Image (cartoon, helix red, strand yellow):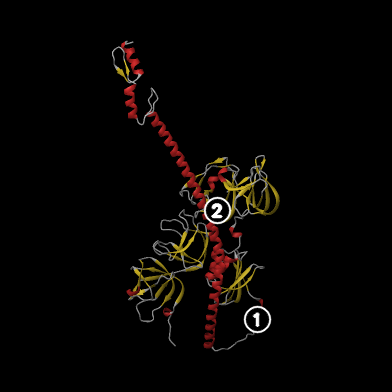
Amino acid sequence: MQNITESQRTKQGCFVYQITDHAVGVRSSPNVGDDNRTDVVYFTNNLVSVDLILPSFDPNSKNGPFLRLSDNSGWLFEKKHGETIARRLPVVKGLWAFYVEDTGAGGMPLRANPNGLRVPYYETVYEPMQLIYCDCQVTSPVTNIASYRVQGTDGWLTEKGEDGTVFLLPENKVKTGLFAYEVISDSLSSYVFKMPSISGGALPMVPFNKGEIITCDVIRQSLNNKETFLRLSDGCGWILVHQMHQIQIPIVDGNWTLVVMNSVGIGMRRLPIDRQDCKTSTLFNPGEMVRCDKKIKSTQGTTFYRVAGKEGWVFDNRGDNEMMRVYATSGRGSTLPNNDDDEEGWSIEFVRGMAAAFELKEIMINEGSRVISFQTDANERINVYYTTRTVGTALNHPSQGATQLFRRRCSNEELREIMQNPRVHTGKGYKKRPKIEERANRSGYSEVEYIDEEADYRNKLIGHEKEEEKMAEKKLMMLKKLKVFDDERAKHALEMKIKKDARTHEFEEAERHRQEANRQIQQAREAAEQRQRCTCQVCHQVFVNVHAKNQHFQAVHVFQCDYCYKEFSSMNALNQHKNATYHW
């Protein structure tokens, strides 16, 4: 049998290499020769993503191993003629959840390689505030900036730019949903920002008055927790929280059918505010029935209802005038969110995604008991009680035998650590040993089965190969199921992008009309001034220019003294001359 060393084994997975001291061209096949060199070149300190490491066929060769690039653009190599060309970097496996930051520059494209600006991109673009899950992390030794591989893809996103611009926000810095805030100051001129930054270009807005309600779909905290921004649900932009002096108020879910009572109908609003600048083109006619699914009651006595399927708002009264009347109702309670993240459990998708990152085998799920179980390659069992964040591990202890260890109220990072190593110590667990095994140990009896060691290893190898095939099929099936959730988030992010683009277009049109009106006013002012300069002050005749007016004046309106025949340019000057010389 041929002896195969570890360095001669073909390895598949997620690997990242750093180009060392040379520019290197990508090859079309696993070979160092220049004949199959492509036009793609990587330079010193560039990072490349690799999915397969192929050793050289000759164990004494000074070339290789060969590295297949994850984007299928070709091959690189670790060494060429014994000289190191690329150095392998450590890749950390786990599960990280991020929201794509709104930098004002649109979405974030998926990169083929970690870090760097000189890298090709995939067609996938993640829109601002879209939630993504990543399963691999690598840090550049040059910039100390981390990049993450998006789960289910071969592409990478970078946490921040070299100038410090944040691209990825940790999941705990963002809350999504529908939130309502009521302004409690008398009158406040506020600004809507293009992105969640006070330097992100402010758009002047009509002041939000006391008692008015705004709704947002994202609450975003800065990394230093000093600033909190709200993204308006109509796509206008972002508002700085402390600038508004608001209080959060509950939103009630339910089903309401309202009938329009106003004689001229009622226009739907983008926000729960009775103002013309929030009015949309949708108009409900008198007597028309409108179905709504959410309700917000202001302290001013007006109740706003969200129109089902339209994300716009109507209201029941305007002062003493009844605008709409509830025809039928079915409430389902308040949706004021709980701000204590530690009390919330994990979703099943989150736990499965974490397990997939470490290639754990799912063996059981019991939705009644709120538990999902996984098995490692070493037959260690991990039970995750996802609603209470309790993680139990069942394994064989070197000295204590079969034990169970339970860890309560685990964080996301602790869950990642346990799935990576079920024997890790978190300092918050308690142990339980099976009673049956304890009695068996006390009895002193045991069964010993003698088998051929070599045959056992060969049979186990065949079994592992079959399990690998099954695991590959299950992994593919799991990725397909997770894609449904990713597509739903991408759809929501795209819908918000469309709303934001529409609001931006409205702002641009309003600004264009304002500038055009100012231009017309300025033109009219300049025309009036020019007309005044070209008008004869004696006969009020208008001329094309000042020169023509002066020629006319000198030819027609010259004032002469009857005594000395001296000429003057105006009657006033002539009278002054007569008074001074007594030429009356």
Secondary structure type for disc 1: helix
Residue 49 image point, x, y percent: 43, 69
Whether residue 298 sits left or right of residue 2 in the image: it is right
Q: Which residue is mark 1?
A: 440
411 over 255 or under it: above or below: below
Residue 235 image point, x, y percent: 53, 51
131, 160: nearer the viewer: 131
- Check disc 1 and give the amino acid type: Ala
Q: CA distance from mark 1 to mark 2?
A: 57 Å
Whether residue 234 sits left or right of residue 73 in the image: it is right
What residue sits 35% from the left and 15% below the top? 575
Mark number displayed over residue 508: none
Residue 494 image point, x, y percent: 52, 58
Q: Is residue 425 visible?
A: no
182, 253: nearer the viewer: 253
Whether residue 318 sits left or right of residue 479 in the image: it is right
What residue sits 43% from the left and 86% below the top? 2
Whether residue 266 sits left or right of residue 495 in the image: it is right
Q: Within 10 angstroms of label 1, few (less than 14), some, or many (20 or more) residues?
A: few
Secondary structure type for disc 2: strand
1 vs 2, front mark: 2
Q: Is residue 479 visible?
A: yes
Quarter of the image where the C terminus is located:
top left
Q: Within 10 angstroms of label 2, few (less than 14), some, or many (20 or more) residues?
A: many
114, 568: nearer the viewer: 568
- Check disc 2 and give the amino acid type: Ile
Quarter of the image where the N terminus is located:
bottom left
Q: Which residue is mark 2?
A: 219
158 over 327 or under it: above or below: below
393, 135: nearer the viewer: 135
Residue 43 image point, x, y percent: 35, 66
